Every structure is written in structure tokens, then in C-alpha cells.
Image (cartoon, rainbow, N blue to C red):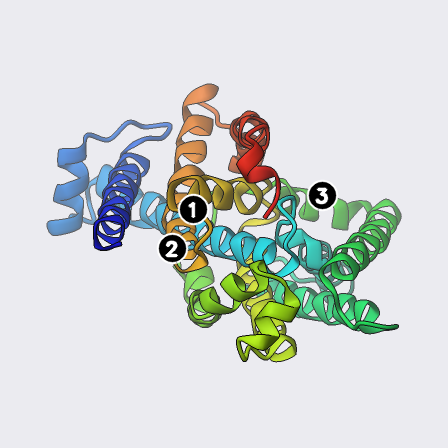
Amino acid sequence: MRSSRAKLLSGLGVALFALVVAAAVSTGVGTRAVPLSTVADALLHFDPHDVNHVAIWELRLPRTALGVLAGAALGLAGAVMQGVTRNPLADPGILGVNAGAALFVVVGIDLFGITALSGYLWFGLAGAALAACLVHGVSSLGRGGATPVKLALSGAAVSAALTSLVTALLLIDADTFDQFRFWRVGSLAGRDGAVIGQALPFLAAGAVLALASGRLLNALALGEDTARSLGRHLGRGRTLAALSVVLLCGAATAMCGPIAFIGLTVPHLARLITGPDYRWILPYSMLLAPLVLLVADVAGRLAVRPSELQVGLMTPVIGAPVFVMLVRRRTLVEL
């Protein structure tokens, strides 16, 4: 037992080191390649007259920080959703979070003339929260309350309905479509420190709630009756878990736009390393997800230089084959 714990702790250290390396590479790679020595010099001895230093501080560092924060949020949210619903195909969108955020961002652009990404954050969070409440309310109807199956079905239905509303609004207003499409593709580029600063409190609160839900998710994996016999308050636990998903995925989606496959694939990678214990799956997901996201972002910058592919286009290319290989393993098909 002690040996297994030591191995898992060592694995977290390796994942953290790999994330630091990926962050360093992300800071140096782009349209203009910047040596790591220049990156270090810019961090330690900033020169406002040096073009490379300015690019690192104003463009590369915010982009890398956004990738780390958004990746960690999506990884945690995906692990929590798979644990709460006991559905290996669940991702943060199962509560309608992505669709709700998208609808409210469109409303903000169309009705209130919001053009700044910092303004998208508040609309995205509000839409994510209301969509999650709607899904929970619908799934709570009838006998048995909000069971995992009813949550999944309600989430799929609400997501489809909200996505239809988004499409209708965009077809009516071409100007709104032009603004929305740049957010909708999912990107880490063009965001500044103000957006990160606004989202950080929500991400921190969501991460605390998510990491604290490990014991509840372990109990749910044994079945609801067993979880109740262990003294777990399932209704309250599910509510707090859902709140963590709303905060994490809502903030990440509002900052970057919808990014697919991170919340779906990374928890399976973490489970492959750690086994079924969510007390380890959650921190591993929090470190592996930003690592995957930064790798995808760097790959997008290198694929079509001097232009680039947005990370929202790269994550399905990288994540889909990995996920197909993972779900073929019988031990990961069921939670």
C-alpha cells in the first residue's frame, strides 16, 4: 500500500515536470521561434524595447497560463462528471454547460453588444449555471430523483435544445455570427491577463470543490445503496459536484470557447495510471489535461506555419484516436 502510494506520488511529480516543460516550450514556440534562453532572460530581466521580450510577456505567457488553467479545469470537470454519472462517455457538456454558455454568449453579443472576451466570461458563467440548473430540475422529476441515467438523458436533451436556439440566433444576425465564430472554434490566442484574472476565483473555487469530492465519487462507484450505507449524503454531494463542474467548465468555456475531448479523454488516461480511486484520478486529471492541451496548442502552431490551427481544432485530432484506443480496453469501458 505504501509502495503504491509512493509510485502514484512519483507519477504526479513526473506529470508536473512534463507540464512545466510543455509550458516552457509553449512560451518559446510560435510564428517567431524564441530560444529558451531568451524566454528565461525575458522572465528575469524584462526589456520593454526587446520585441521578443514584449511578445513573451504580452502574448506567449497569457496564452500558456490560459492553457494551463483551462486544461486543468476541463480535466477536473470531466473526471467529476464521469464519477457522478458513472458514465465513461460523460464529459462536461453532459450537464448542458457548453450549450448554455454558448447561448448566453450569443445573447450577450446580439442584445447587449458585448465584444470583449472579458464580457463573455460573465455571460458564459451565467449560461452554464442556468443550463445545469435546468438539467438538474428536469432530471429530478419523477420517481428516484436525479439518477445518473436521467441526468445524462436530460443533459443531452437540454444541450440539443439550447444548440438549436444558438443556431437560430446566428442565422438571424450575420454580425453576431461573425463575432461568435471566433469564440466558438476554441482558442487560447488573443486572450489577455484581464480575462484570466476575472476567471481565476471561479476556477479556484471549482477546483477546491472538485478535489474535495474524491471520497464521494469513490462511494458512488460502489453503487448508491452502498454509498448511503457509508453515510454519504448523495443529494448534497451531487449538488456540490455539479457546482464544481459549472464553475470549472463554465469559466474555461467562457475564456477559450468550447474545447472538445479534453474532459472526455484525460480522465481515462488518469484512470489507466491510478486505477479506480478518484482521490488520485482527480489530481492526475488536473495535471495531465493542461499537458495535453498545451501539446495540442503547440502542434497547431507548428502544423501550418507561419499561420496556425486553433487548439479547438487540434484536440479532436489528437484526442479521438487516443480515446478509441482507451475505450477498446475492457477495463475502461465501465466505471
Badge 1 crowding class, 10 Å Cα cut-off, few under 14, some 14 to 19, many 20 or more, is some
Task: State the SS at label 3.
Answer: helix
The amino acid at mark 3 is: Asp
The answer to which image quadrant residue 96 occupies is: bottom right
Q: Which mark is residue 280?
A: 2
Image spot of residue 335 (x, y percent): 59, 48
Q: Which mark is residue 178?
A: 3
| Location of mark 1 (residue) | 275
Image coordinates of residue 29 in percent, x first then y, are: 32, 31
Q: Earlier in the sequence, mark 2 or mark 3?
A: 3
> Disc 1 residue type?
Gly
Nearest to the eye among marks 2 and 3: give it: 2
Nearer the camera: disc 3 or disc 1 = 1
Q: Earlier in the sequence, mark 1 or mark 2?
A: 1
> In the image, is 253 to the left or to the right of 61?
right
Tell me: 38 left or right of 226. left
Amino acid type, mark 2: Trp
Please report contact status of discs 1 and 2: CB closer than 8 Å, yes or no. yes
**Residue sitting at x 54%, y 50%:** 256
Q: Is residue 69 visible?
A: yes
Q: Measured from the top left, where is residue 202 in percent x and y? A: 49, 70
Q: CA distance from mark 1 to mark 2?
A: 8 Å
Give the residue displayed 83% in from the left and 47% down from the top.
167
- Say left or right for 48 vs 156: left
Residue drawn at x 36%, y 51% as measured from the top left: 65
